[in-house]
């Protein structure tokens, strides 16, 4: 066996997982309701096949053969890195019961469909049994993987390697200390929030969000935008990277910023080295997912960077508001770029995470993380979730949640079995500021942002983040690009400067 045999086996697994992604994309965008049960079985079959191939004796022999062939190569040789990274991840996967992997994959499709209906009809009771089964499976997965301190550690680390619940709690405490004074200060801002609630036809929202996504660097020749219940990005190698959006006629920012968020994910996937297609460096063996980002947090940093660091900046709207005004001349005839910038940055505690402002967004994440940790530890019952959600929303955001659609049913993650992924949104927020600060040290990037030319920034991100796929661990990638370990300082500083501008 040789490295070439190893590459062939890995490519086959990646192909299967790309097919799973395609079936998943269709299930969440185009599939008729009647296709749910069959689709769940189709996905379970393919995921089971990928699992069997990844944990097979044949692949293990290929790994050993590749190790032998490359024994004299430099330890930094990408081929050696690919072999060792695959071996480590597959070692983790091998600890998870194959039956559990297939059952979780089948449950995911059925649970997502049930969740979609339950969310639309405010019927938590209809979704609760499937959520209970999901949490039971996630507890089993955590036990199979193993952990030292808390079962949540095992799940979080599958999305963000090296992260633990104890470390997260420290990050959350530091963030709260920085955010709460800013949230109080932001109430002094003079904002015309009502301009965002006017009637903005959805087709025009879609067109404008696509225009800006292309300006940022999302390549529509290798991608497309479709509607969905909960926005997401998904790829089938770098040559086909799709994004989705959700639009409401009477809430303009929700559609625009969600699309730019997903475009940021898409730019990441489209920017991965072509040499890494169908390889270890675009395959998540633990979660059995074809994806090129080195971690969910790193991936989230790229979406939040374009959405917030660029898309919510004052200079961005000074440059691009005229185009928006041409799309919506009647709705925005009495609005200035300054008015609009202030409106989209207003701190308004709300029920929906994906529509939250920057000052309250991480409070939504802290709430979800605490609930997930409690569920996995067996300290919280699924039946009690709606009331626990309401209690935490009152405590963190001062809001009384009127129904479960605006509360515990709003996110797709639990129906997808993505328990442990919520913390990566906050990690991504933190990293986005660190990457952005490092990039802006280059004169060409700062000049580009000033002139509305986003290519220099995209190029820097391609060169320092995207191209590496999963070949670097997230901590190494961050240090190599910024010279810093994960730190909340830049993120809190960005928010502090914004609040000072808003209240000046």
Image (cartoon, rainbow, N blue to C red):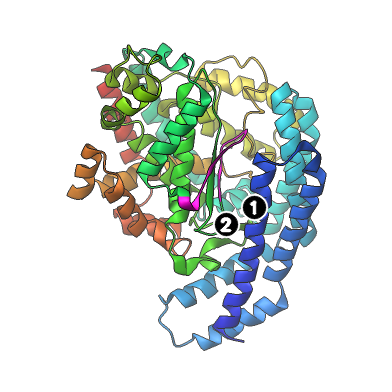
Q: Report whether 59 appears left or right of 498.
A: right
Q: Magenta stretch?
A: 221-234
Q: Report whether 391 appears left or right of 429.
A: right
For label 2, count other residues whose C-alpha is less than 10 Å away and answer few (under 14), some (14-19) or many (20+): many
Q: Earlier in the sequence, mark 2 or mark 1?
A: 1
Residue 22: mark in rendering: 1
Q: Report whether 475 appears left or right of 139.
A: left
The answer to if 107 sits in the magenta stretch is no
Residue at 72 percent of width and 33 percent of height: 115
Q: Is residue 417 visible?
A: no
- The location of residue 406, given as percent across then percent down, is 62, 22
Image position of 178 with respect to 72: above or below: above
Question: Considering depth in this image, is 114 or 325 the residue closer to the camera?
Answer: 325
Image position of 204 with respect to 288: above or below: above
> Image quadrant for the N terminus?
bottom right
> Image quadrant for the C terminus?
top left
Where is mark 2, residue-wise? 236
Residue 35: mark in rendering: none
Residue at 35 percent of width and 31 percent of height: 312
């Amino acid at each position: 066996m040789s490295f070439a045999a190893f590459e062939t086996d890995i490519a086959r697994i990646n192909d299967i997982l790309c097919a799973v992604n395609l079936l998943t994309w269709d299930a969440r965008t185009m599939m008729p309701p009647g296709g749910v049960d069959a689709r769940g079985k189709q996905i379970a079959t393919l995921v089971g096949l990928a699992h069997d191939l990844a944990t097979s004796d044949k692949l293990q022999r290929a790994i050993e053969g590749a190790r032998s062939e490359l024994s004299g190569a430099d330890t930094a040789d990408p081929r050696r890195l690919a072999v060792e990274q695959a071996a480590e991840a597959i070692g983790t996967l091998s600890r998870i019961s194959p039956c559990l992997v297939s059952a979780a994959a089948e449950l995911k499709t059925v649970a997502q469909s049930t969740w979609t209906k339950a969310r639309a009809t405010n019927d938590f009771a209809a979704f609760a049994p499937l959520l209970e089964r999901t949490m039971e499976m996630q507890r089993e997965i955590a036990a199979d993987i193993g952990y030292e301190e808390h079962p949540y550690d095992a799940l979080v680390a599958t999305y963000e390697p090296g992260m633990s619940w104890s470390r997260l709690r420290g990050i959350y405490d530091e963030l709260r200390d920085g955010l709460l004074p800013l949230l109080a200060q932001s109430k002094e801002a003079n904002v015309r929030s009502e301009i965002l609630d006017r009637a903005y036809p959805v087709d025009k929202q879609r067109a404008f969000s696509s225009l800006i996504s292309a300006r940022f660097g999302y390549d529509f020749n290798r991608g497309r935008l479709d509607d969905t219940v909960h926005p997401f990005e998904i790829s089938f190698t770098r040559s086909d990277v799709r994004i989705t959006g959700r639009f409401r006629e009477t809430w303009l920012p929700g559609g625009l910023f969600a699309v730019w968020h997903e475009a940021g994910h898409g730019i990441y996937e489209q920017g991965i080295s072509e040499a890494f297609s169908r390889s270890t460096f675009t395959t998540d063996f633990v979660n059995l997912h074809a994806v090129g980002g080195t971690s969910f947090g790193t991936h989230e940093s790229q979406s939040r960077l374009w959405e917030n660091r660029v898309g919510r900046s004052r200079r961005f709207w000074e440059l691009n508001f005229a185009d928006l005004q041409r799309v919506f001349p009647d709705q925005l005839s009495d609005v200035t770029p300054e008015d609009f910038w202030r409106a989209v940055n207003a701190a308004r505690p709300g029920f929906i995470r994906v529509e939250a402002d920057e000052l309250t967004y991480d409070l939504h994440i802290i709430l979800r993380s605490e609930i997930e940790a409690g569920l996995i530890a067996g300290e919280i019952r699924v039946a009690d979730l709606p009331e626990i959600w309401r209690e935490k929303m009152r405590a963190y955001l001062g809001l009384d949640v009127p129904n479960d659609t605006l509360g515990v049913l709003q996110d797709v993650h639990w129906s997808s079995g993505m328990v442990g992924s919520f913390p990566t949104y906050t990690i991504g927020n933190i990293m986005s500021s660190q990457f952005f600060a490092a990039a802006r040290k280059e004169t060409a990037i700062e000049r580009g942002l000033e002139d509305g030319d986003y290519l220099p920034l995209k190029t820097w991100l391609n060169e320092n983040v995207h191209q590496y796929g999963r070949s670097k661990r997230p901590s190494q990638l961050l240090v190599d690009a910024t010279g810093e370990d994960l730190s909340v300082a830049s993120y809190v500083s960005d928010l502090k400067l914004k609040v000072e501008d808003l209240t000046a």
